[in-house]
Amino acid sequence: MSIGGILSRSIWVFHFASGPCNNCDIEILDALTPRFDLERFGIKLVGSIKHADCMLVTGMINVKGAPRLKYLYDMAPKPLAVVAVGGCACSKGIFKDSYYTRGPVDRIIPVDAYVPGCPPRPEAIIDGIVKVVKKLRSV
Amino acid sequence: MVLFYYVVFPGFLAVFVAGGIASWVERKLTARIQARVGPPFLQPFYDIKKLFIKEITIPEHSTRSIFMFSPVVAFAAVTVVSTIVGLNLINRAYGFNGDLIVCVYLLLIPSVCVVLGASASGNPLASLGASREIKLVLSYELAFWTSLAIPVLKTHQLKLASIMGFQAQNGAIASSLSGIIAFIVAIICMQAKLARVPFDIPEAETEISGGAYIEYSGPLLGFFKITQYMMLVILPLFLLEIFWGPVNSPVGILKYLLLLFIIIVLENTNPRLKIDQAVKFFWFGLFPLGVIGIILAMLGM
């Protein structure tokens, strides 16, 4: 099996939240519940960025969060896939004119997949993961 | 031949494959208990293979050598103990006087390595995990040794093979009153040794986010994972050899699966204890129970 193939079969996800309203976070947890059960594909949430293969970023990235996001991205063992989840992380959303945002995510770190929606449904999050898997398999 | 024993069978390779399957059973059953579908059969091996192609990150403020060596030492220790336990399973003539004690010490080394690696990583959450691991080791080791004293008292042997031979002639240790007490104490200590849920205090994913393992990445984390998989096989087998022999038959596999089932059910029906609760439980709950068992064993029951 190729490197990309093995990476796509065991994706450990680290969840970074910087100023979200919590809706996206709840939808991410929904994707792990019995109805959707992402563990079928070997996906699980981990608590440390050092264990992660994929970083989910939610929320408009605020002033405090932006340097920490960069720091976490630099700390993570590569290869690492980054997914921006929700309208705020993809494009600042309703915080377009806020004085406190440093987002969106792709202004700070490279992003592999975007999952728009406010909040995105679990199906949309799974679709984003499929995008990441396809991208990894083509590595 | 010795190298074959250590690397292929019954050492590293066989126990690793068995441990991966046991780990899959654990994850699958957990998922079924939670009404989920669960991971595919080869998931533990995918995880290991993936970890071995990832990058190693070493924290800036860590003690480099200890940080890098402790997972490897943990892995080596569990390989040695799996060879000893496994050779005793297939060949009664193998073994040396006192290998029971050697096994227990070798089973302790992975915990010590977790403490060393976590303290060397220089992460505050990891040091919290290390301190909890030390307290957990201090609490369960006392009860564990007490439970192991009972079969030694009953058989007057310190050799695994002799204890198994005794059980082949006179029935399992666990069929007597003191034996069953010792077996229950040992099973609960095994849960703590494997750091499964009521006693997963040093890892505590939701609370200190992986605790002792927080700074480990890539192959180093992979070695710790392999160690955990192998412990999941070798520790129940070790207890079976001592308390519920003979194991070297197809019935032995059923006995092992029963122990694995007990581990998984305990894991899924209990909340995590706090560290002070765990120490109290082991010192003032299980240790007196073990002492009662020793007294009963001396009275010949």
Image: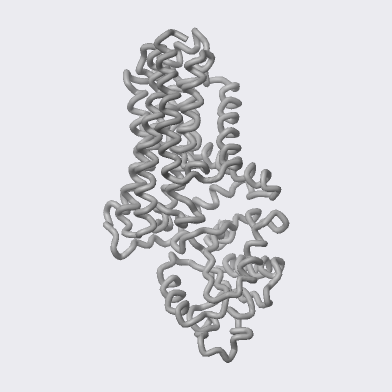
The front one of A95 and A81 is A95
Q: Residue at x 55, y 83 (%)?
A: A104
For this orientation, the residue located farthest to the bottom is: A97
Compared with A117, A126 (above or below) is: above
The front one of B101 and A94 is A94
Q: Residue at x 45, y 11 (%)?
A: B166
- State the quadrant of the N terminus of chain B: top left
Q: Is residue B4 visible?
A: no
Q: Residue at x 46, y 38 (%)?
A: B192
What colouring does the structure picture have? one colour
The front one of A1 and B143 is B143
Estimate the x, y position of residue A10 in percent, counting from the top left. Answer: 56, 57
Q: Is residue B44 visible?
A: yes
Estimate the x, y position of residue B300 in percent, counting from the top left. Answer: 44, 8
Determine whether, in the image, residue A88 is placed left or right of residue B97.
right
Estimate the x, y position of residue A131 in percent, counting from the top left. Answer: 64, 70
Compared with A89, B242 (above or below) is: above
Q: Residue at x 55, y 47 (%)?
A: B44
Number of callouts: 0
Estimate the x, y position of residue A63 in percent, counting from the top left. Answer: 46, 82
The front one of B98 and A104 is A104
